[in-house]
Image (spheres, rainbow, N blue to C red):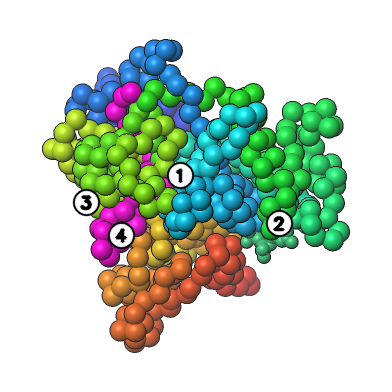
Amino acid sequence: AALVTVLFHLGEMATATQSLDEATFEILGQEIGWNIKIVSAEEEDRELLQQFDIDLDSEQEDQDDKDLKPRPPVVTVMGHVDHGKTRLLDTIRKTNTSAHEAGGITQRIGAYQVTVNLEGEPRKITFLDTPGHEAFTAMRARGAELTDVAILVVAADDGVMPQTVEAINHAKAADVPIVVAVNKIDVEGANPEKVRGQLTEFGLVSEEYGGDTMFVDISAKLGTNVDKLLEAVLLTADADLDLRANPNMDARGATVEARLDKGRGAVATVLVQQGTLHVGDAIVAGSAYGRVRAMLDENGKQMKEAGPSTPVQVLGLTSVPTAGDVFIVAPEDRTARQIAEKREATARAAQQAKRRKVVSLETLNEQFAKSEVDMLNIVIKGDSSGSVEALEDSLMKIEVSDEVGIQVIHRGVGAITQSDVDLATVDKAVIIGFNVRPNRQVQELADQEGVEIKYYSVIYQATEDIEAALKGMLKPEY
Ligand code: GDP
């Protein structure tokens, strides 16, 4: 009650149960003679690394201009569903990677690099192979700022659509320059000029119209002008960005995709952003750690080292990191393990705190029998950490009403297992399988327990269904 009085004098109308914002907390601390410091998760992690003599800030500032070397731009493809993002990524991969020259087979590892001739000079571009702003934003949420340039794909026969606008907003929020690929110009009724006109409304004005955004009319299907598009990416990067990094330091970057492989254990694709990663380096990515046993490029070729903007598949981690987890090189194996374990413990504590909060909220509701919030519990299993993250991110954005909400109680990479069904039974959850299925035994168990398992391979279909389910949970009004 005394605290409430202090708060009252600060101009805060607080009740005894209300939670306070951070600034209020700090002032409150001063009032009662305590020095309260609110530490964000990010700062906490920074402090943890400092205990091991790893100082991200000072290293960044210490970069000497002469140590910085040009690096290839990293590109994400975004746009409305069915406008041709996947087709474009496939066409670029097929026509521009070295795999077909060497007769090799290109594997999807989450990212790939192509070489383009610009004014007679060979230049590289790195593509992130999971299209869409959902994956892009899910990675950013975990601290990974990987993308330098966004290609916005707009189908010329369809024009600007809702997800086109979302993609623009997400790219703008991240301060990432956009190159527009006006796709499907081979289709009858394609109207590239209309797309140019529509996009001016969103601040994307083509050079022909006096703006500074590059537009390229392409056909991802036929491969028309895809070379021009790649040139436009390089020209935009050269004009807007100063893409340089120091290759001669311990590597740092982010996890692009990760999964558990039956034969090879944890397999993670990382993108090196600074420094050079070597076979034998001890690394930590989120709460996964290990020594780099081998590195492979997208053609399955073994690599000994990987410099800035290079994506590589890394073998040797003891567990599977999450897409977007930042990775660093630790001075020795032991340090890597200790950092990973501390992070794991912090994450667990945070989760427990969250759970406690939910419980107390429910008790409150019971006590006051107020308008209850109905939660739809969900378990997500998917084929890669990237797809799981992207799906969860999209589901969390669904808003139907204040009375109903979603709670993802568990998520993971891999097939749907008995323990998933068990959890769903206990917490009355629906299981979502994204490109994964259970085996027969597990399916039978689910049937027995009355646990619903839904399968999807497209994010928006899942969000549509869940939204419909939430609407169904709304109590009829009398
Ligand atoms: P995404 O949802 O944006 O990844 O779209 P997709 O790449 O899956 O493409 C959606 C559909 O459009 C597929 O059937 C593609 O084959 C087709 N498509 C993509 N690009 C072109 C194009 O340039 N011309 C034509 N005619 N069809 C295309």
Element type at marker 1? Answer: helix
Picture residue at 72% right of the left edge, 50% below the top: 224
Rendered position, 133 above or below 252: below
The residue where tag 2 is placed is 222
The residue where tag 3 is placed is 318
Mark before the other along the chain sequence, 4 or 2: 2
Mark before the other along the chain sequence, 1 or 3: 1
Instruction: Inspect the image, locate mark 3, and give the three-letter code of the amino acid beneath it.
Output: Thr
Instruction: Inspect the image, locate mark 2, and give the three-letter code of the amino acid beneath it.
Output: Leu
Given contact means CB atoms under 8 Å apart, are the residues at marks 2 and 3 in contact? no
Label annotation for residue 260: 4
Q: CA distance from mark 4 to mark 3?
A: 10 Å
Q: Which residues are magenta?
A: 248-270
Judge from the rendering whether residue 220 lies leftward or rightward of residue 279; answer left or right: right
Work out which residue is located at the far left of the displayed protein and give it: 334
The residue where tag 1 is placed is 139
Count of numbered circles on the image: 4
Picture residue at 42% right of the left edge, 38% below the top: 310
> x%, y% of residue 355?
31, 54
Mark before the other along the chain sequence, 1 or 4: 1
Element type at marker 4? Answer: strand
Rendered position, 104 above or below 53: below
